[in-house]
Image (cartoon, helix red, strand yellow):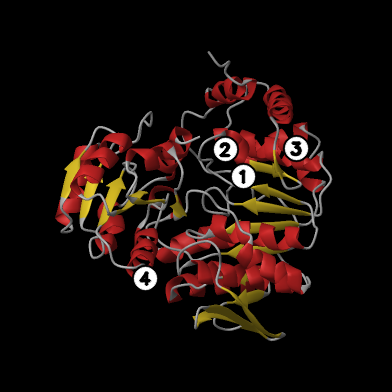
Amino acid sequence: MTATPRSDIILERMMSLHPKIIDLTLDRVWTLLAALDHPERDLPPVIHIAGTNGKGSTQAMIRAGLEATGARVHAYTSPHLARFHERIRLAGTLISEPHLTEVLDVCHAANDGADITYFEITTCAALLAFARTTADYTLLEVGLGGRLDATNVIERPALTIITPVSMDHEGYLGDTLGEIAGEKAGILKRGVPCVVGPQEAAALEVIEAWAERVGAPLLVHGQHWHVTSERGRLVYQDETGLLDLPMPNLPGLHQVQNAGAALAALRHLGLPDAAYDGAVERADWPGRMQRLTNTTLNVLAPDVDLWLDGGHNPAAGEALATHLRSLPRRPTYLVCGMLNTKDVRGYLRPLASVADHLTAVSIPDEANTLPAAATAAAARDVGLPAQEAGDVTAALSQIARDAPGARVLICGSLYLAGHVLRLVE
């Protein structure tokens, strides 16, 4: 039997420190960072990324662009898919088990049993690891919101980015697009430029008001930079000129706007041409419209065109539907599992126009999973024929029998995506 990694044991212990009542605040983070002698003040230049959709893809493209110039890049992202180590990349390499165990131990001891959320204490561990490792840049992805997120402790980042804002996490961030945009805009800092991706008018209005209030210059899509696809190429333009590049290697037409934000960031940093080519050609971001090949699941359904995506809100559903519509036509089946905190019908509604059938599953080992029966009922409510299966492998086996040449998208949750990636490791 394989021994449980020590980092997993420490992470489980950290879960017990979670406050009884959730209150979004930075007080616990500041207290722990002070006990750690403020590692957040000893980082390479920070690029801080908030938004509802596209944060991870945009970060992946920026990292690929920076690394294409030879830069060493720290990167922090969440949630992880298969292993916690995915959240912390030190100078280009995923954090090792010994290093992760060390910084978790230090943070757990420094916190001294005080209430703190899992995300807060593990963010402090990431910042400590970054401060102890030499690099040229640090990329920080916001976990939830921005204003009161545990990553929002950098006094003066080199740059901030706000990717498209849409409805999600309303219970924490607000019930309107404007309220949610205000939370995202909380990462803006006086004198620090912010790249703003495509936004609905209500969101952009709030972001611009925040920027004026704090004195943050904006680089706004549609005003200061433009990006589009033309004849199979990506065309980016700003005041310094035009870039004619290959389409992003990350699948999906929505990646064009994410690439635009990444390119705007890299242009602002004044990087050479290698950075722009690297951003669109070398990015790696698992679980986001990822094609699965040569895995145990492909053996189970050998003639199926198999894809995996962790998007889970209405905007993600729209993006997926657009991408599926752009692919060569073939019967399209969804294997879907979602959390009970998500807008299931809002996510599935755009997909109902491009998918032929949905098989609902519950997410294994996830307390907040939506039962498969509820997901199937939501699919039927939006006009998508649906059935249930006990798990992903059972769903794939059934589809392989009923429609052997189908395209299958496993979707609905990053937690389900992580489960699938662990299955095929």
Q: If you read the primary sequence from the N terminus, does the residue marked by circle 4 or circle 2 appear first?
A: 2
Does any portion of residue 115 appear in the rendered image? yes
Q: Quadrant of residue 120?
A: top right
Residue type (three-letter) at the residue carrying disc 1:
Ala
Residue type (three-letter) at the residue carrying disc 2:
Phe
Q: CA distance from mark 3 to mark 1?
A: 13 Å
Q: If you read the primary sequence from the N terminus, does the residue marked by circle 3 or circle 2 appear first?
A: 2
Judge depth for marks 1 and 4 and give the one in front.
4
Residue type (three-letter) at the residue carrying disc 3:
Leu
Q: If you read the primary sequence from the N terminus, does the residue marked by circle 1 or circle 2 appear first?
A: 2
Q: Nearer the viewer, residue 25 or 410?
A: 410
Relative horizontal placement of residue 378, taking residue 290 as reference (left or right): left
Judge depth for marks 4 and 2 and give the one in front.
4
Please give the residue where the numbered disc 3 appears in the rendered image.
Answer: 128
Q: Nearer the viewer, residue 119 or 316?
A: 316
What is the x, y in percent for residue 135?
Answer: 81, 49
Please say if 153 is above or below 14. below
Judge depth for marks 4 and 3 and give the one in front.
4
Residue at the outermost top position: 1
Answer few, some or many: residues within 10 Å of disc 1's Cα (few below 14, many 20 plus, some between 14 and 19): many
> What's the mark number on residue 150?
1
Element marked by disc 2? helix
Please give the residue where the numbered disc 4 appears in the rendered image.
Answer: 326
Q: Quadrant of residue 101?
A: top right
Q: If you read the primary sequence from the N terminus, does the residue marked by circle 1 or circle 4 appear first?
A: 1
Q: If you read the primary sequence from the N terminus, does the residue marked by circle 4 or circle 3 appear first?
A: 3
Residue type (three-letter) at the residue carrying disc 4:
Ser
Please give the residue where the numbered disc 2 appears in the rendered image.
Answer: 119
